[in-house]
Image: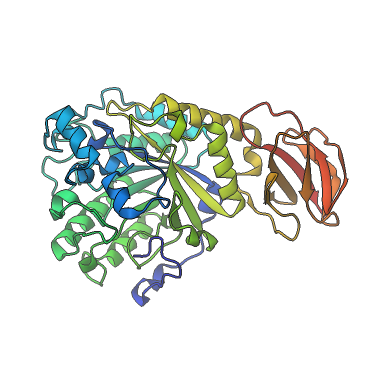
């Protein structure tokens, strides 16, 4: 699989899709991901930690991803299975489709919150591993949100609201796993059984082709893999699908989770796959907590508040990446209050500092270097360099080449002059008092 694989190789049949990264995506920096499905009704998972920090067999049995509930409740003796027995009498997972009301869902309200963060693109799930689609997808019968549960085309509502909010629209689609279609046993190890046959390849092709035709996404965000039978040339091949996508969205982008085929950007997830962050175009995705789907067991102790989320965002951007930050809607269709607060704090910080983040590029480390003690990260926009600082001290030593940055030009985000003096290998700058959560910004002119 191309996902999380360093040095992935693109087959010859896919070379024709290689083009320079669209500027909109390079400039975007922040996207908002949304995981929503029948799993949002039980909304239950053990918040044990971040992906990439926990041994896999333990991970699957105690999966912190609430969107994996269908898988976890099928693992004999798992806490999730016990929860399902005690809370729902061991009812089948598909009962949650009918319990999923979305009665309070307002796509415009969700996208207004998303847009207020400064995010430039929005990517909702259209089919997760449970196989339930958020539109009337071909071949799904009644296992979709138009026929059951919400009785609404949720993808269409998201798409219209995203366009109206002035953001780029993307679609997430799980091509590598479909626990209902494939009838595979539950995943308990990292060598994941998945459907790879022609029947599933055609089924998945019809879904993504339909998404492209109906909703013209700018981002095609696949997950896990793609059925092997659909990777070679043919009428319903992945090659044909990419051709359709780029014809509809010439400046669209595709991620790297379609197997070792084609990608415009690489992806890491929480702490897994960090090796790909050395590549030219990459994106880190993660939830505000340890889950993507809404998990009612998460609280402030295992979730990013605004300051922590901004810290992570600035670090990603300073190293040349984008952040796709996830929220998980409740079964009713609301953004949980804890997640709402985090997004609002990101928005407040970007309102002050966003011009030095969005459209920026990493600063050449020969000009100035990042550090962890004190915590300093740098970006560049045009002929200005921006330092983002977190410290409890009133001053900070910035490691920089004083011949390449004009020390006397030091100023805050709102243009107020900053006092500086020579330091050991750089300059010492006075820091303004922080008025909002997140790093303090200092800006310098580049010689």
Q: Is residue 177 above or below residue 410?
A: below
In the depicted view, which residue is nearer to us: 243 or 433? 433
* Residue 252 relative to residue 371: left or right: left
In the depicted view, which residue is nearer to us: 208 or 103? 103
Res. 306 in view = yes
Could you tell me residue 245's position as x and y percent?
A: 34, 57
How did the renderer colour the structure? rainbow
Q: Residue at x 35, y 59 (%)?
A: 257
Q: Quadrant of the C terminus?
A: bottom right
Could you tell me residue 29's position as x and y percent?
A: 54, 47
Could you tell me residue 13's position as x and y percent?
A: 34, 74
Most extreme residue toward the bottom, as rendered?
12
In the depicted view, which residue is nearer to us: 223 or 58? 58
Q: Is residue 177 above or below residue 35?
A: below
Q: Quadrant of residue 428?
A: top right
Q: Quadrant of the N terminus?
A: bottom left
Q: Is residue 200 above or below residue 108?
A: below
* Residue 154 relative to residue 319: left or right: left
- Label tally: 0
* Residue 71 relative to residue 113: left or right: left
Q: Quadrant of residue 416?
A: top right
Q: Residue at x 28, y 64 (%)?
A: 238
Res. 98 in view = no
Q: Residue at x 22, y 42 (%)?
A: 78
Most extreme residue toward the top, as rendered?
104
Could you tell me residue 361's position as x and y percent?
A: 63, 53
């Amino acid at each position: 699989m191309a996902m999380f694989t360093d040095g992935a190789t693109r087959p010859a049949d896919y070379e024709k899709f290689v083009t320079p990264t669209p500027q909109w995506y390079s400039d975007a920096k922040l996207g908002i991901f949304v995981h929503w499905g029948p799993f949002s009704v039980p909304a239950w998972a053990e918040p044990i930690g971040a992906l990439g920090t926990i041994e896999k067999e333990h991970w699957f049995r105690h999966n912190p991803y609430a969107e994996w509930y269908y898988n976890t409740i099928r693992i004999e003796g798992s806490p999730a299975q016990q929860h399902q027995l005690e809370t729902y009498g061991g009812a089948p997972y598909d009962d949650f489709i009918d319990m999923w009301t979305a009665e309070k869902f307002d796509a415009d309200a969700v996208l207004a919150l998303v847009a207020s963060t400064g995010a430039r693109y929005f990517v909702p799930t259209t089919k997760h591993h449970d196989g339930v689609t958020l539109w009337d997808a071909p071949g799904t019968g009644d296992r979709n949100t138009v026929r059951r549960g919400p009785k609404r085309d949720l993808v269409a509502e998201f798409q219209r609201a995203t366009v109206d909010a002035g953001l780029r629209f993307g679609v997430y689609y799980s091509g590598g796993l479909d626990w209902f279609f494939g009838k595979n046993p539950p995943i308990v190890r990292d060598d994941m059984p998945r459907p790879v046959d022609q029947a599933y390849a055609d089924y998945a092709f019809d879904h993504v082709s339909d998404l492209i035709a109906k909703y013209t996404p700018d981002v095609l965000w696949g997950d896990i893999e793609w059925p092997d039978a659909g990777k070679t040339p043919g009428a319903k091949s992945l090659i044909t699908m990419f051709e359709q996508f780029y014809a509809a969205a010439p400046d669209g982008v595709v991620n790297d989770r379609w197997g070792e085929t084609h990608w415009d950007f690489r992806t890491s997830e929480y702490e897994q796959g960090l090796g790909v962050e050395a590549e030219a175009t990459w994106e880190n995705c993660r939830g505000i907590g340890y889950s993507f789907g809404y998990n009612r067991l998460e609280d402030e102790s295992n979730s990013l508040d605004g300051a922590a989320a901004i810290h992570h965002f600035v670090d990603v951007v300073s190293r040349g990446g984008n952040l796709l930050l996830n929220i998980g809607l409740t079964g009713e269709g609301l953004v949980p209050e804890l997640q709402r607060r985090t997004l609002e704090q990101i928005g407040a910080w970007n309102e002050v500092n966003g011009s030095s983040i969005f459209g920026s590029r990493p600063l050449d480390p020969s000009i100035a270097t990042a550090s962890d003690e004190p915590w300093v990260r740098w970006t560049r926009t045009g002929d200005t360099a921006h330092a983002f600082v977190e410290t409890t001290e009133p001053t900070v030593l910035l490691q920089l080449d004083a011949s390449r940055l004009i020390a006397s030009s030091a100023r805050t985000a709102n243009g107020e002059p900053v006092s500086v003096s020579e330091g050991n290998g750089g300059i010492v700058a006075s820091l303004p008092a922080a008025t909002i959560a997140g790093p303090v910004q200092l800006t310098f002119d580049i010689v």
